[in-house]
Amino acid sequence: MEQLKQRILEEASILSTDVLKLDRLLNHQVDPELTMEMGREFARRFEGEGITKVITIESSGIPIAFATALTLGVPLVFARRKKTLLAEPDAYSERVPSFTKGIVTDLMVSRQLLSPDDVLLYIDDIIANGDAAKGLIRIIERSGAKLAGLGIAVEKTFQPGGRLIREQGIRVESLVRIASLADGKIAFE
Ligand code: G4P
Ligand code: NA
Ligand code: NA
């Protein structure tokens, strides 16, 4: 998606050789028109898959997932992240490490929101190592819902998340792929 590449070049900054700061586009400020464009692109790529719900993880995945769900005319479910999970019998939970925050959190989705009749489209802002994504995929598998695939705005291909998920036979569509952040430069694939 050329428009997103341009905006990343103009507005992102490199925090380290493996972290891109996207606060002006995805993680702190949101551009509604650009976000709607991303949602329409994901909806177009997964059109005809019979998606019944869009799913993401709070918080930064929510705007793009909302834009996708609005375009497809289906509900959006967002997994919650909790620091400590008290036993909640009505929820699926999976423990995942967080790449940028260096902490472990529990992803939680109410059992009532996912059913074996659902066909889910998982939307997220960034994929790095894929730990959070793999956690949410385990929850989806446990629910019996079908996963049509993942739509990711920014895939960092020098980290293994996207590849590991494709190796599970799951379709992963990313709008922008970043091959390297070395030498202070954003290198797209
Ligand atoms: P993963 O899903 O690929 O494993 O991602 P991981 O768990 O490693 O990432 C944890 C958090 O770090 C995610 O946000 C993810 O979006 C974010 N992240 C990973 N790489 C980058 C990066 O290069 N730049 C930025 N800005 N964020 C990155 P989160 O913990 O779910 O938090 P939230 O932003 O959704 O609240
Ligand atoms: Na994030
Ligand atoms: Na995210």
Image: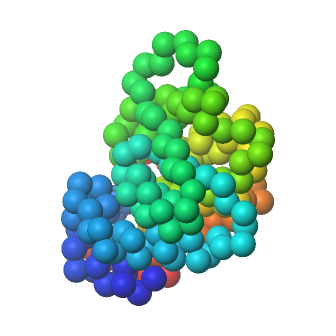
Q: Position of residue 128 (x, y in %)?
A: 48, 56
Residue occupying image coordinates x 52% and y 44%: 77
Farthest bottom residue in view: 2
Residue occupying image coordinates x 22% and y 65%: 24
Q: Is residue 186 above or below residue 74?
A: below
Quadrant position of residue 42 = bottom right
Residue occupying image coordinates x 41% and y 43%: 58
Left or right: 94, with 1 as reference point: right
Mark count: 0
Regarding residue 163, the answer to whether it shows in the image is: no
Residue occupying image coordinates x 36% and y 84%: 3
Q: Nearer the viewer, residue 47 or 179?
A: 47
Q: Position of residue 30 (x, y in %)?
A: 26, 62
Here the colouring is rainbow
Left or right: 31, with 66 as reference point: left
Q: Position of residue 180 (x, y in %)?
A: 42, 72
Q: Is residue 119 above or below residue 9?
A: above
Left or right: 72, with 5 as reference point: right
Q: Is residue 25 above or below residue 8?
A: above
Quarter of the image with the N terminus in it: bottom left
Quadrant position of residue 82 = top left
Q: Position of residue 36 (x, y in %)?
A: 39, 71
Regarding residue 26, the answer to whether it shows in the image is: yes
Farthest front residue in view: 73
